[in-house]
């Protein structure tokens, strides 16, 4: 019986399931609108249907909530993951402390939360527990707690508009993709067990400690998502671990991410030398006017050293060559490569 340890020994095979969750799909697809680099087509559909004003409202509502990162927790407060109108009604009916409990990640017992909810009360509550500067709460804006009912009402209104205007009409699209993804993960589990499935989706074979500590995990659920801003995300607590994963994160996308990683390292290595930066400055100042000898003279370096530097800059894609007479090689800065570097880094860091 394969087990994995946290504070408890867990038989992963006995507690693991793979299934869809329309509620989580709706929440995560709405969040992905604010990161259009991963889902540009879906963002376009929403803008064309609901307008830019809806996207602006969504951004304003989501920004204090870690860009919507905290909102998946609301899905774990309902049993029926397919009843989307019922889910929205449930969120609308939540008492203020329950709403805050979910936004804070279900980490603190609901009974311990402030009776009267305000930004100052929440700040003091977190500070008293020494977690105000933890990663989960660092920089978080709790000013909305001064009018929590307004935030709750706006969130519900956004989700209703989103569900009725867009998501309801498209939620059954790509059914074959979901079924294919679930089938592929089921095959991995059948071949190597739930531990191998965990490795395949998350890249590691550990689980976080239970929250609360005396509540062992009873369920590990893998949920495929079509409109998702990450390769995977893990939520846990109160006996459940849910791993959301991008069903498009296949071998092709993984290969693209690996190549992006190699490209970033090549460029970073090429830029990590003051002489190569000096050479780039010279070349950028006058396109196709510098050959190796002129670079060496202006940079006060030997031609052999410059030749090695130019080779590394060329292999990193930072410079381009041109030979007007098939003898003399002139250099030009690759502006596209430099301009796209920051975007490449962001895409890599965000698994885009």
Image (cartoon, rainbow, N blue to C red):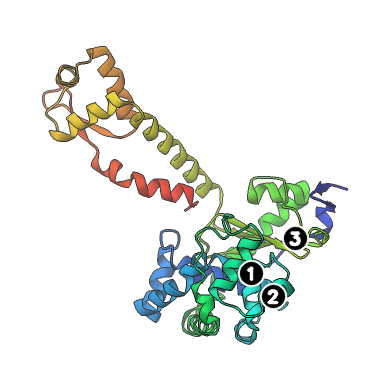
Return the residue found at the far right: 1
Instruction: Check if mark 2's residue and mark 3's residue have beta carbons within 8 Å.
Output: no
Q: Position of residue 175 (x, y in %)?
A: 59, 70
Callout 1 crowding tier (Cα within 10 Å): few <14, some 14–19, many ≥20: many
Depth order, front residue of 191/313? 313
Instruction: Check if mark 2's residue and mark 1's residue have beta carbons within 8 Å.
Output: yes
**Which numbered circle lies on residue 211?**
3
Check the image and report above or below for 49 versus 274: below
Q: Which of the two discs, 1 and 3, sits closer to the camera?
A: 3
Q: CA distance from mark 1 to mark 3?
A: 14 Å
Residue pointed to by mark 2 = 77
Q: Residue at x 76, y 65 (%)?
A: 238
Residue 191 can be seen in this image: no
Position of residue 16 in the picture relative to residue 202 (left or right):
right
Check the image and report above or below for 193 versus 163: above
Choose top left, top right, bottom left or bottom right for residue 129.
bottom right
Q: Position of residue 234 (x, y in %)?
A: 64, 58
Q: Position of residue 95 (x, y in %)?
A: 65, 84
Instruction: Check if mark 1's residue and mark 3's residue have beta carbons within 8 Å.
Output: no
Q: Position of residue 186 (x, y in %)?
A: 72, 56
Callout 3 crowding tier (Cα within 10 Å): few <14, some 14–19, many ≥20: some
Depth order, front residue of 176/347? 347
Callout 2 crowding tier (Cα within 10 Å): few <14, some 14–19, many ≥20: some
Q: Which of the two discs, 2 and 3, sits closer to the camera?
A: 3
Residue pointed to by mark 1 = 73
Q: Residue at x 42, y 50 (%)?
A: 346
């Amino acid at each position: 019986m394969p087990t994995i340890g946290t504070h408890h020994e867990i038989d992963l095979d006995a507690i693991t399931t793979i299934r869809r969750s329309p509620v989580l799909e709706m929440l995560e697809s709405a969040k992905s609108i604010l990161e259009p680099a991963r889902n540009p087509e879906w963002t376009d559909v929403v803008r064309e249907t609901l307008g830019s004003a809806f996207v602006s409202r969504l951004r304003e509502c989501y920004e204090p909530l870690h860009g919507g990162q905290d909102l998946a927790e609301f899905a774990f407060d309902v049993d029926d993951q397919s009843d989307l109108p019922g889910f929205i009604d449930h969120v609308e009916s939540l008492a203020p402390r329950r709403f805050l409990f979910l936004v804070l990640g279900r980490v603190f017992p609901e009974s311990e939360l402030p009776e009267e909810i305000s930004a100052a009360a929440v700040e003091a509550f977190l500070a008293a527990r020494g977690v105000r500067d933890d990663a989960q709460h660092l920089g978080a804006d709790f000013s909305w707690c001064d009018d929590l009912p307004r935030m709750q009402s706006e969130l519900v209104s956004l989700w209703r508009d989103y569900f009725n205007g867009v998501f309801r009409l498209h939620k059954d699209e790509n059914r074959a993709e979901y079924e294919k993804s679930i089938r592929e993960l089921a095959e991995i589990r059948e071949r190597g067990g739930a531990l191998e499935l965990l490795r395949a989706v998350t890249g590691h074979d550990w689980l976080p400690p239970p929250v609360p500590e005396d509540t062992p995990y009873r369920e590990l659920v893998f949920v495929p998502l079509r409109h998702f801003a990450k390769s995977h995300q893990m939520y846990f607590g109160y006996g459940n671990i849910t791993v959301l994963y991008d069903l498009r994160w296949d071998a092709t996308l993984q290969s693209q991410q690996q190549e992006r990683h190699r490209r970033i390292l090549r460029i970073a290595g090429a830029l990590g030398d003051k002489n190569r930066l000096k050479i780039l400055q010279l070349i950028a100042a006058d396109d196709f006017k510098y050959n190796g000898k002129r670079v060496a003279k202006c940079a006060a370096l030997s031609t052999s050293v410059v030749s090695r530097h130019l080779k590394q800059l060329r292999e990193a894609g930072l410079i381009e060559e041109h030979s007007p007479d098939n003898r003399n090689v002139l250099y030009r800065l690759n502006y596209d490569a430099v301009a796209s570097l920051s975007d490449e880094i962001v895409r890599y860091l965000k698994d885009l």
